[in-house]
Amino acid sequence: MFALKLLLLLLQLFYLSSARPGFENYSTRLLQRHGVKRVDFRLVSQQEGLYYTELDTAMRDILLQMRNLSQQTVLAQFDWIRARNVEAGRMQLPVLQSEPFPCDLSGGRSPKVPKDVRQLRPGDIDIVATCGDSSNSGTGILGLGELDAFVEYRGYAYTGGGFETWRTALTLPNILKLYNPRLYGYAVGHSLGADVNVARFNLAEPMLNIQDLPFQAHVLIERFRRDPRVNLREHWKLLSIQVGANDLCSELCHSPNPEHFLRVVARQLHETFRILKEHVPRLLINFIVHPDIDELLSLLSRAPPKCVQRMPYFCSCYNRYNDNTLYDAAKRFLRLQLSIAALPEFRSADFAIVPHGILRNISSLWSEQGVMVKHFFANDCIHYSQLGHAVLAKQLWNNMVGQADLTSVEEWRRPYKRFLCPSPKRPYLRTESDVL
């Protein structure tokens, strides 16, 4: 029986690898372009630097197809899974067709394509893209148990998902679509990032950290250049980046020393922004920074009892921050990111990086009596639910056109409470940070 199951699995993997032309793998070439070195596989640590081995090359396609097989198996029951999340209160309440969108859409697109990023209106965005970690790959959004905790519901991701409409799935692309119906680049469904026909320019990947961002930037540029619907020089592009949780949860405490960790973060983040500025004209970046280490520890400490035992798996550094050296490095981690994003070299007429601090008070806003409110989190207690993504989409949008309120509990629990809009006095998207 085992041999038969194994044979069936291999046949399915063969079918997926031959029948899914949307899957692309230019990884080895891009790794080499990025300066990542190929070395022989060894169990001992390499010296400082970036490496890949023949094991990575040999297993990459197999692991990709296994992940996709798991993804498609779960998604075959999508309607049932979605219904269970509705019952659990983890989905936003649908907006009736009789209810209009909260903002006046007239004047949302400039009469003439602007040349300056400071004069960019919501409808001027032609292309949306997302880089980062599992927060925006949609990992676990509708997960019901251990077996589907890693399924990627990418179309619901608040920065890069465009599945359904704003009435049932509030995301930033589903808002921007109203201002520009020809908007392109958002994930049109739920898939792995490698499935370019579905994920499009939502490249977020589980377990990604800042060290991986330059490679992801190269992949994004490659997709831009290969897609005939993208005019790289003329189209205005909005790229949202959210990364950092895995650096604090899995990297810092295992680094040879904190200074080494911060040195790598600084180098890789600077390189990411340099690559993007050099190769992607007309680009506005939403840089969604993770909050101070105190906020992250506060959020994790509010996990319900059923999730406490999972913390060492999701965040192996969680109990290590009583070490003053690690704690101080984690405090510097946020300041380092902001200082790099603010460098004058990353500011020009057609390029801007805007840090957003919308996550900096989430532990108190989404908790009651010291325990996180389950409706805003996925079943794994780590990722956001669809309702959580909807609220984050509203807050990111508010921060792009005005100033999000980071203190109102009611505003953080209702996707359409205090929905800000562009106005004749403030028609443009913000290009300045709200993070001090």
Image: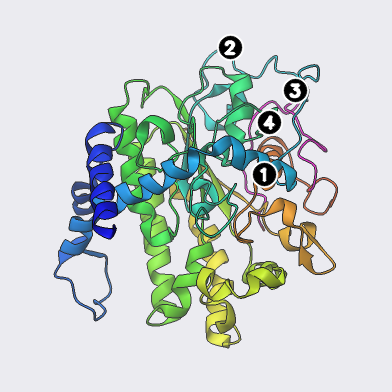
Residue position marked by numbered label 3 in the rendering = 101
Spatial CA distance of label 3 from label 2 is: 22 Å
Q: Is residue 181 left or right of residue 187?
A: right
Magenta segment includes 423: yes
- Residue under the point 19% across and 56% down: 57
Q: Earlier in the sequence, mark 1 or mark 3?
A: 1
In the image, the segment drawn in magenta is: 413-435
Q: As shown in the figure, which amino acid type bears the numbered disc 4?
A: Thr
Spatial CA distance of label 4 from label 1 is: 15 Å
Helix, strand or loop at label 4? It is loop
Write down the quadrant of residue 435 in the picture.
bottom right
Q: Earlier in the sequence, mark 2 or mark 1?
A: 1
Quadrant (top left, top right, bottom left, bottom right) of the C terminus: bottom right
**Residue 247 at what x, y percent from top left?**
48, 67
Q: In the image, which disc is placed on residue 168?
A: 4
Helix, strand or loop at label 1? It is helix
Residues under numbered marks 1 and 3 in contact, where contact means CB atoms less than 8 Å apart: no
Residue position marked by numbered label 1 in the rendering = 84
Residues under numbered marks 2 and 1 in contact, where contact means CB atoms less than 8 Å apart: no
Q: As shown in the figure, which amino acid type bears the numbered disc 1?
A: Arg
| Mark 3 or 4, closer to the camera | 4
Give neighbour class at mark 4: few <14, some 14-19, many 20+ (Cα, 10 Å).
some
Give neighbour class at mark 2: few <14, some 14-19, many 20+ (Cα, 10 Å).
few
Is 85 in front, or is 51?
Answer: 85
User: Extreme top residue here?
Assistant: 111
Residue position marked by numbered label 2 in the rendering = 111
- Residue under the point 68% across and 16% down: 107
Q: Earlier in the sequence, mark 3 or mark 4?
A: 3
Give neighbour class at mark 1: few <14, some 14-19, many 20+ (Cα, 10 Å).
some
| Mark 4 or 2, closer to the camera | 4
Q: Earlier in the sequence, mark 4 or mark 2?
A: 2
User: Extreme bottom residue here?
Assistant: 323
